[in-house]
Image (spheres, helix red, strand yellow):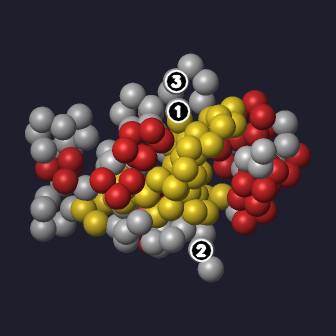
Amino acid sequence: MPSYWLMQSEPEECSIDDALKAPKKTVPWTGVRNYQARNFMRDTMRPGDGVLFYHSSCAEPGIAGLAEVASTAYPDATQFDPKSKYYDAASRREEPRWVHVDVRALKKTRLVPIAELRAQKALAGMVILRRGNRLSITPVSKAEWDCITNRLLKP
């Protein structure tokens, strides 16, 4: 059975539109520098898992599209590049600290703002809605996925 995820990206760095324009509609989800989010990618994510593509740190944060995990985790090359803002001087090629997965954009949706997510009782336990949540990748339950895709994203 697939798992489901909410993955946050700043639209200026990689928006759903950028992902849809990428070759094979696939982008590497680089730059994650939180151990728990890294562990989700490394230990739990599998190709075919569903992704809610969430725009963050913008005028109106919210779900902007649907995607899927397109690869298993592999070393994030940005950790080794001193010119990258994601450079990690302590990481070693023979024992990389950071990994990423590739994400394939499936479609752009109407923007579902965080206020609309909060208004749904069925989503009350969603990790993204928890006070103090700072994770850029969070698990989504099957019930939460169904509520969003079958109720909020249906025309």
> Few, some or many C-alpha atoms within 10 Å of disc 3 (few <14, some 14-19, many ≥20)?
few
Q: Residue at x 39, y 28 (%)?
A: 12
Q: Looking at the image, can residue 144 be seen? A: no
Q: CA distance from mark 3 to mark 1?
A: 5 Å
> Vertically, is 56 above or below 135?
above
Horizontal and vertical percent position of residue 107: 55, 50
Q: Amino acid at mark 1?
A: Ser
Give the camera-side residue of 126 and 13: 13
Q: Which residue is mark 1?
A: 56
- Mark 3 lies on a secondary structure that is loop
Q: For the N terminus, which image quadrant?
A: bottom right
> Vertically, is 71 above or below 139?
below
Horizontal and vertical percent position of residue 138: 57, 53
- Mark 2 lies on a secondary structure that is loop
Kindly identify which numbered label has been placed on residue 58: 3
Q: Quadrant of residue 25?
A: bottom left
Q: For the C terminus, which image quadrant?
A: top right
Q: Amino acid at mark 3?
A: Cys
Q: Residue at x 12, y 44 (%)?
A: 81
Horizontal and vertical percent position of residue 119: 84, 36
Is tag 2's residue or tag 3's residue first in the polypeptide sequence?
A: 2
